[in-house]
Image: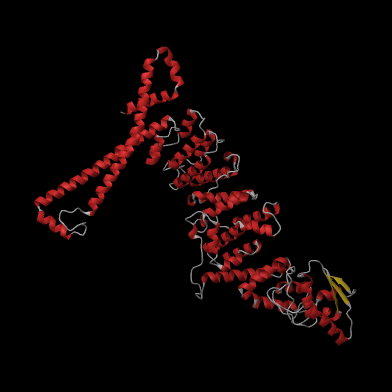
Amino acid sequence: MQMESASPKDSSSASSPFSSPSVAALLKIKIISWSQETGLPVSVRVRVAERTFHLHRNPLFSRSGYFKRRLIETTQLELPQTFPGGPETFEMIALFMYGSSTLIDPFNVAALRCAAEFLEMTEEFCSGNLCERFDLYLNQVVLQNWDDTLIVLQRCQALIPWSEELLIVSRCIESLAFMACMEILDPERRRDKPVITLEALAGQAWSCEAVKEILSQELWIKDLIALPFGFFKRIIGSLRRQGMKEKYVSPIIVFYANKWVLSKKTIQYWESSGERAGDATANDKVSTILQGVIDLLPMRERASRVVPVGFYFALLSRSVGIGLRNDSRVKLQDQIASLLHFAHVEDLLIPSSGVSSDSSSMELATMESIFSTNVSLKMDTNNTPSAGNSIVAELWDTFLSHIASDPKIRPKRFMELIETVPISCRQSHDQLYRAMNTFLQAHPDISQEEKGAVCKYLNCQKLSQWACIDAVQNEMMPLRLIVQALFVQQLNTHQAFKECSDSFRYAQSGEFSGSLSSTRCANTKSQYLADSPYMDGAEPGGRTLSFLLQKDIAVQRCEFSRKEYESTSFRIQNLEQELFSLKKSLQLQKPSKRAETLPAKPQSAKTVWLAKQISKQE
């Protein structure tokens, strides 16, 4: 006999979706039959929750040690509220006591086994009693099938601590872990493609949607991440004990966190369960899961190839708003610091636009701490930065360019942020120049001394051509930096002209030697040209393809250098005109007023100093 299908409102652990006749009706028939066969009326009243069962004493005494002990001096008994499975499960147990076969399925076997243990229905009182029967079904049927094991494990959640004490949970977890390992090993070669890993996400910024797309390929992983975190954590431990490689274990953890911590659907889940995402209770749940995920993830170098650093950044960003425990946040930050050279700009924590000041935001403090930790980790005993720090330095400068627009960041604080990563770590100063330029544009009222102090870290020799040209034409930059950029630009232009001249000299010498050989040794050259596979044409007077490409490159480089030189010369010409105007105005003024005029025109003094520097250079 099967039990009755549960109504939508019935959340009993024993409910089953299988269609079945009413268990209550079957039990009523059995009770009437027993009374007719024995001539004995019902003599015991058992109350379970809100329902009362009128039963005979003998069937209860013969199969249950609990009833045999409790019904000696009374005929009325109320089972505790903690009775496993509630009245629905007891109804099925009572039906079995009257000799009816109880149909077991994965939806009710856990509750029935726990209830049988509570009622002490062991072999001591009856051969083939319920405890032994349910254990056989669990071991021989349920634990051999993935779906059945998942169903039983989910039902065990409402049956704790009974399901734990009877090792039903442990047996299900070990069985699922074993079958997952077999799925990875695939001894029967049933898989059409390899098991998914996170290697595809290592070279790009973190994306929850990309993770979902990868996850859709593995249904068995989707089953595991649907479990409560307590069960999931134990399955991960069992997978590692049974020898599953970390490159397969870590993605499962990442998928779980993506579903329950990072995904936007998490908010919808909490709302559907009657809780708002902003409530303390919901945040506490997310925080508990996040702390557990951090404990499960591999740390330090073990994680460098199996978990993208962008995932750790995503967890850190989520932790800001849910009150993660301080030790867990520090552990997460240290992990990010050890893998920072694998990060992308999009992974960094940028202060939100709603924050009153970036300088006081938690994101800035967190990022500063992470980069400081990274620098200390990468420094050797001689305090010399490693080569890999150049990547980290560029990331930091890019981050500074995002926050430099905050007008509340003072020059001294901005200088402290620049020094977070040593200047010697920077192979290129382009990103640093962008950050400084953004800062100066957001702070037009700072003094020339403060501008000079902020820009003292910039080395024009480490600027690219476009950045150097922009610095020359940037009036926000201090005078010293403009002069340095001019000198560097002149050197670059001179070098470009020299290379261009060498290229033309080489091209012209090749053309001359070719024409000479053609007049003196026409037959010999025509023979070689006919046999050469590098000729663009068949006639002896043609040019080789490599010669034409070299000539074209030389022309292009010469044209680029000419335009670059014209841009620099135009800037110098403007400065010379300003200097000439200054001298002319000074000659027309009296010597007594010269001291008053010069302080009134700081830009003119700036031009005088620049003229002296240019004359010295010449």
Considering every residue shown, the one lying at the far bottom of the view is 37
As drawn, 609 above or below 513:
above
- Residue located at (44% from left, 40% from top): 424
| Label total for image | 0
As drawn, 425 above or below 530:
above
- Residue located at (79% from left, 75% from top): 91
What percent of the width, then of the height, locates residue 57? 86, 79
* Front-most of residues 584 and 113: 584
What percent of the width, then of the height, locates residue 393? 47, 44
As drawn, 461 above or below 279:
above
On screen, residue 393 versus residue 331, left or right, reads: left
What percent of the width, then of the height, locates residue 549? 26, 51
**Residue 171 in sight here:** no
- Residue located at (82% from left, 80% from top): 28
Q: What colour scheme was applied to this rendering of the protein?
A: secondary structure
Name the quarter where the C terminus is drawn.
Answer: top left
On screen, residue 86 versus residue 352, left or right, reads: right
Name the quarter where the N terminus is drawn.
Answer: bottom right
On screen, residue 130 versus residue 552, left or right, reads: right
- Residue located at (86% from left, 87% from top): 37
* Front-most of residues 48 and 236: 48
What percent of the width, then of the height, locates residue 544? 21, 54
